[in-house]
Amino acid sequence: MAVASNGPLLEKYLGLDQRGSVQAEYIWIDGFNQLRSKTKTLSKVPSCVAELSEWNFDGSSTGQAEGHDSDVLLQPVAMFADPFRGGGGGGDNKLVLCETYNPGNQSIQPAVVVITQLILNMIITTDGTPHATNFRYACKKVMDTYADAKPWFGIEQEYMLMDPETNRPYGWPRNGYPEPQGKYYCGVGAGKIFGRDIIEAHYRACLFAGINISGINSEVSASQFEYQVGPCEGLDMGDQLWIARYILDRVAEDFAVAVTIHPKPIQGDWNGAGCHTNFSTEEMRQDGGLAAIEKAIEKMSLKHFEHIAVYGEDNDQRLTGKHETGHIGAFSYGIANRGASIRIPRQVGKEGKGYMEDRRPASNIDPYRVTAIVLESSLGP
Ligand code: ADP
Ligand code: MN
Ligand code: MN
Ligand code: MN
């Protein structure tokens, strides 16, 4: 039997006073592009992420280390209010996003690390090298290089709710299929929407946490939804999307429902799932910026397959040229064209400035890798 959380019963305990202690949920990305987390008690409310100490975990249980030398370090890099534990009336308990590092030989006193971080006003780790699965580290370098361009991103995360017992989409009949696609996109009413409670709870929880969530909608396939995060500048895009994903996994868990971000969860005439990545620089947002948008698209077109390489596993099942996608084998772009690799929104074409939409990234991307390559291809050599 699927075990859902018992809200009223839990309330009795979560209502107990924390007596000044704070719960910090350390979150990281594992070796399978999935999220993991564990909790640490703090003695006071942290005012910035640099105040949080490093931690570690057993990488042999997360696809990130061999059994004999399994410690992987957690370096806190971003902090959000915890919508699950609340705390102090306004979210004193925290969600803490971490980067992963290989442990080094010399051990540095945490106090020294904290002071160094404050001085440099950036997160550094003197304990070893970034873990092979730490794509934020390389992304930060790219974002720092082109920071003057003020790059903004907005990602549309599509996903499907799943019944963990049957491994079928949530609300679908046990045998057979719901009615064909057509009525589900932005649908209203019973028989069109399966799981609105979950998407509403996620939306509010994101707002509480401080995620720049710009909207939600139900999608073309039954039990498929989307939320948009952005515009976010630079590295913040990846941080916020990963935390929004974390919050969705946790909210759905409360309802005993699972979330899949596989790009083609159901074979056949059911839309796949993407992470359309909207992108602009300051120049593109200013009058006449369309020229800069077109120039960037020209440059990106030359690296189509390098982009595809980091645009998600199994994306070939989705980018078929059908279901509002451009074919994986060829680059294309156009104004208002939802069958292209890159679309310039109609409004942007009309105003002559704004942003572009890269429609190729799959729902299961690592946003650090995608935002980095988009920026580097657009502005780099
Ligand atoms: P679509 O019409 O493709 O479904 P959405 O409304 O779902 O578009 O998503 C648009 C996304 O574009 C949002 O995440 C929004 O934050 C983002 N966005 C808007 N303006 C910009 C901009 N200038 N630069 C980057 N992203 C932007
Ligand atoms: Mn959208
Ligand atoms: Mn969509
Ligand atoms: Mn879109």
Image: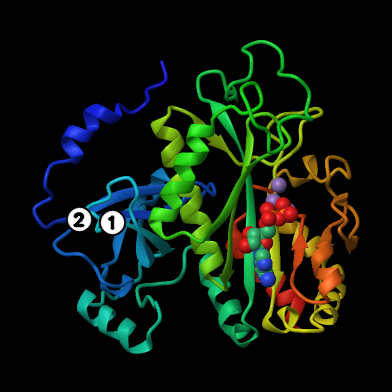
**Residue type marked 2:** Gly
Q: Is residue 339 above or below residue 188?
A: below
157, 186: nearer the viewer: 186
193, 362: nearer the viewer: 193
326, 336: nearer the viewer: 336
> Contact (CB < 8 A) between labels 2 and 1?
yes
Identify the coloring. Answer: rainbow
CA–CA distance in space, label 2 to label 1: 6 Å
Label 2: few (<14), some (14–19) or many (≥20) C-alpha neighbours in 10 Å: some
Q: Quadrant of residue 293?
A: bottom right
**Residue type marked 1:** Gly
Residue for point 27% across, 50% down = 86
186 relative position to 126: left or right: right
The secondary element bearing badge 2 is classed as loop
Residue 63 shows up from this direction: no
* Residue 149 drawn at (x, y percent): 65, 84
Q: Is residue 216 above or below residue 49?
A: above
* Residue 112 drawn at (x, y percent): 23, 82
Q: Quadrant of residue 251?
A: top left
Residue 267 shows up from this direction: yes
Residue for point 76% across, 76% down = 378
263 relative position to 238: left or right: right
Q: Which residue is mark 2?
A: 88
* Residue 287 drawn at (x, y percent): 77, 84
279 relative position to 94: left or right: right
Label 1: few (<14), some (14–19) or many (≥20) C-alpha neighbours in 10 Å: some
Q: Quadrant of residue 331?
A: bottom right
In the picture, which quadrant includes the N terminus? top left
* Residue 109 drawn at (x, y percent): 21, 77
Q: Tell me, for residue 91, which label it has, or none.
A: 1
Residue for point 61% across, 81% down = 150
Disc 1 Cβ-to-ligand 1 distance below 8 Å: no
